[in-house]
Amino acid sequence: MLVKPITYYTGVSIVKSRDIVLNALLGKEGPIPWIEIETRDELIAKTFNVKNVGWTERVEYAKFVGQDAVGMAHWDRFGNKLLEKNGVLGFQPLIKERGDLDKFFNMPNEIDEEAIIRQVKEAKEAIGDSGLALFVAHLLCLDPVMIDLGFENFCYKLYDDLDLIKDMLERYTQYYMKITSIYSSLPEIDFIWVGEDIAYNSGTFISPKQFRELIMPYFKRITDKIEKPWIYHSDGNILPVIDDLLGLGMNAIHPIQPDVMDIYALKKTLGQKITLVGNVDLNLLCTGNKDRVKKDVRSLMTVIGKGGNYILSSSNSLANYLNTENIIAMGEAKKNWNMEKYSAHL
Amino acid sequence: MYYEEIQNSVANGKKGKTLELVQKSLNGGASGLDIINQGLIPGINIVGDKFESGECFVPDMLLASYVVKDAMKLASKGLTEGPSTKKATIVLGTVKGDLHDIGKNMVEMILDVSGFRVIDLGVDVHEEDFVKAIREYKPNFLGMSSLITTTMVEMQVVIDALKSAGLREDLKVIIGGAAVSEGFAAQIGADAYSRHAALAARQLKQWL
């Protein structure tokens, strides 16, 4: 699916965001898009100085800063209490022992497919003829189990009550198999973004052997249901299990966390097999200056974008505490680079 | 005595076996202090070294800490002075505005079983509470944790508050968390940065 831009008399090509996102996911060389797994509504509200943020504001924000996609998310976890302080999210686990599943685990028996379809149509209406791509982000199964049990309790249960962990993994696997099947069937959805953190800065949460034997079979059952181009996200250093993850068949990986994974080295080894999505440092976007942001963006687009297989993104997501000017600078740098290289106006 | 066997059973996360060996050692006349210093603490150090080299992972460290915690209770029975087993005191906390505590909790567990007295102030700790705790407990060390960029700047605030209160000189400050780095530690005047709990324990022991 190659992009066929419309060329105006100025020689500038107008390209649709959706097309270049899909091209990049499929490994085609061309204008480089910018996408984010999540852009917090609080950031949008702060930028536009509004109280309420809906699909209209999300689409306007994407167009304003220069992103090429908007998305919805299923960060559904059913056995914990959400805490929030100063915009920072925390979770209070509610499942201490098996008996707590009946008391506190509130996964619905049925998924409200009509509600999903309504939301997707609402998003698509807001997108209109802007050309933005539409995606859904969702979890797999390890993250919600760890959140519901609490990480410490999860670690103890690996030894004390592995069956409880397996029971919970199975419940979430069934749930997210249904979720991803629903979204895969909707023509309005252009791609899927799986978000499942499995690693710290120093390496995987559990040993690669345990990850491979215990977790990967559940991951595979869910991802085998995906029928759109898709991206896999995990923070931290996933190199110890990258070959296992690649076996899931994703089109791209994100974010290649800059302080623990070297995207430039990964380009040399994986760069033509899979699309790399990332990795503008969140610390830079928060406390750095505009010129440095632009320099980093240009370097990424030039080096990692060479030969295709690259999509610009931050090293995590656009959190509410980021510097608005730096985000705008990121979009400007992306726009200017695409104009210089491809005469492409995005 | 069974010190080497205790080290190995701790390193392998065998709670039942560890408790059995501790009891056997006590029955054989070993002192609780020797069991702790020659069996349990070296056992946790083995796990720390293996974590550093990539042979062990976080669940293994947590499990070993869990085993040692229970074994220490058994070994400590009959010890007349609890604090005498403690090498030094550290005040720990996640800084203001930050709710994350997994790394801090791991540091607490490893330091506790490694013979440190740990005063855990919890999460979202304001600078005045850190200062108050330093005044009250007079610790040897202060450990601060931060996971996100906006809250890591609070570490500088705490260090400045300690300087203003005249408390900075008598204290070593160590920081950790996903957001921070060695460069950041140097920038704010902390004494050290630690990538993970086992390294933090090692740094503190080096300072003693």
Image: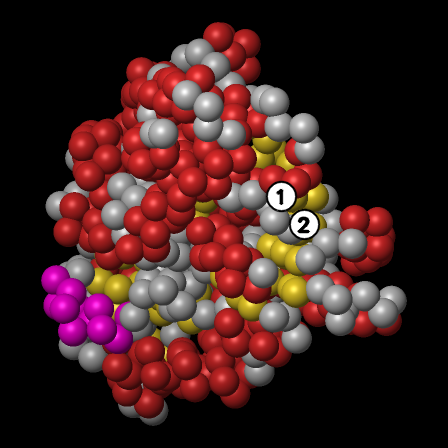
Judged from this view, the residue extending furthest toward the right is: B165
Q: Is residue A136 shown to the viewer in this render?
A: no
Q: How many callouts does the rendering have? A: 2
Q: Which of marks 1 and 2 is in front?
A: 1
Q: Is mark 2 on a helix, strand or loop?
A: strand
Q: Give the range drawn in magenta.
A: A263-273
Q: How far apart are marks 1 and 2 (CA)?
A: 8 Å
Classify the position of the N terminus of chain A by image quarter. bottom left
Q: Which is nearer the eye, A307 or B169? A: B169
**Subunit that carries the residue with mark 2:** B
Colour theme? secondary structure
Q: Which of B115 and B144 is in front in this view?
A: B115
- Label 1: which residue? B86
The quadrant in which the C terminus of chain A is found is bottom left
> Residue at coordinates 39% horizontally, 57% vertically from top-left?
A201
Q: In which quarter of the image is residue B164?
A: bottom right
The residue indicated by pointer 2 is B89
Rendering coords of residue A253 (x, y %)? 27, 56
Q: Is residue A99 left or right of residue B132?
A: left
Q: Residue at x 63, y 70 (%)?
A: B190
The reply, left or right, for residue A224 in relation to residue A166 is left
Please tell me how crowded label 2 is: few (under 14), some (14-19), or many (20+) other residues with Cα within 10 Å: many
Residue A29: x and y, percent?
18, 73
Point out the residue furthest to the front here.
B29
Let me know if marks 1 and 2 both belong to one chain: yes
The answer to whether marks 1 and 2 mark residues whose Cβ atoms lie closer than 8 Å is yes
Q: Which residue is drawn at 36% across and 29% down?
A: B1
Q: Where is residue A272 in the image (x, y as percent from the top left)?
A: 13, 68
* Dominant secondary-structure state across the stretch colored magenta: helix
Disc 1 residue crowd, few under 14, some 14–19, many 20+, Cα 10 Å? some
Say the numbered circle drawn on residue B158. none
